[in-house]
Amino acid sequence: MFQEMLDQLRQIAVLETQYQEEETKEMEHEKVFVEGIRHLNFIYIKEEFCHWYDKRDSLSLLKTLYKDLLLPHMLDKASSTKDLVEFLIESNHLTSKDFTLFFDTINATGEFELVRKIQEEVVTFPNVEEISVSKFSHHRCMLVEFGNNLTEKNVESIRDLVNDAPTSYGDKWDLINDLENRQIISEGKMQLFIEKLGILKLGEPEEVLTKYQPGPSKLFRSSMYYIFAQSKLVVILQQCKKLNSPGL
């Protein structure tokens, strides 16, 4: 009797082991399937992304956007959006498991129609407008928006403002790249450049730079309010003193 029970327990253990092995295989197959779908989606998104930006001659814009992510020789060597994307993959900034850089690029450049295009084939592709940019700095996004608002006339005006000798630029992104290389514009040190631009009265491009600049700190605002309140109080006290003075 005891032996029979022992044999039954062994059979149950064997069956449970087989079940677990089969379940593990199914999970592995499912994982492989999901990974395959994700990889196919990545390939499709990458192709659509590259085609979209190349069609709009956005290589210089993207080089400005990716300047903090890629080495200078990579940026110089890239002759297409696909080259940039391959360098980003090589540098582990972009993978089939993490599409964030695609989302952030679309957000920073405002190419939201590309989202609708991709969603026709990849329904799980999110509405990137609802996602906060995380791969690019505040400063980098500002430069891209600034560049997108520059006209040819603006570029000529800024060129003449910052150069003593005659200088030519291939496009507005070439100008921005030169300003960065010469440290005329840099993160946290934009105020002097903005003040210079005030001479040109560029309008919208200048407004872009201004809106990205941090306002007075909370402590500074509180101090200014305190000084203002104190000055008003002094005026009120002086007026009261006059009213209470003899002979009035």
Image: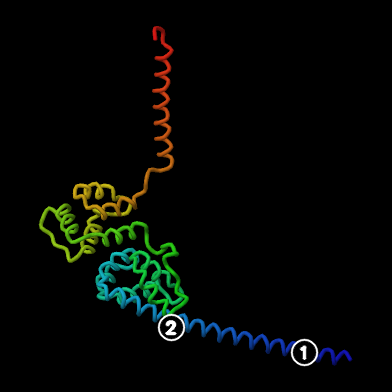
Pick the front one: 88 or 100: 100
Q: Position of residue 183 (x, y in %)?
A: 25, 54
Disc nearer the start of the sequence (2/1): 1
Residue found 34% across the figure and 60% down from its top: 141
Q: Which amino acid is tagged 1?
A: Arg
Describe the element under mark 1 as helix, strand or loop: helix
Describe the element under mark 2 as helix, strand or loop: helix
Q: Position of residue 195 (x, y in %)?
A: 24, 46
Q: Position of residue 1 (x, y in %)?
A: 89, 91
Q: Which residue is mark 1?
A: 10
Q: Residues within 10 Å of mark 2 (few under 14, many from 20)?
A: some
Q: Which residue is mark 2?
A: 40
Q: Which amino acid is tagged 2?
A: Leu
Pick the front one: 130 or 43: 130
Whether residue 207 is situated above or below residue 101 in the rendered picture = above
User: Quick one: which residue is furthest to the left in this view?
Assistant: 166
Quarter of the image holding residue 228? Answer: top left
Name the side, left or right, on which 133 lies relative to 82. right
Colouring rule applied to residues:
rainbow
Q: Position of residue 37 (x, y in %)?
A: 47, 83
> Which quadrant of the rendered structure holds the C terminus?
top left
Whether residue 33 is situated above or below residue 168 in the rendered picture = below
Q: How many marks?
A: 2
For marks 2 and 1, give the CA distance. 45 Å
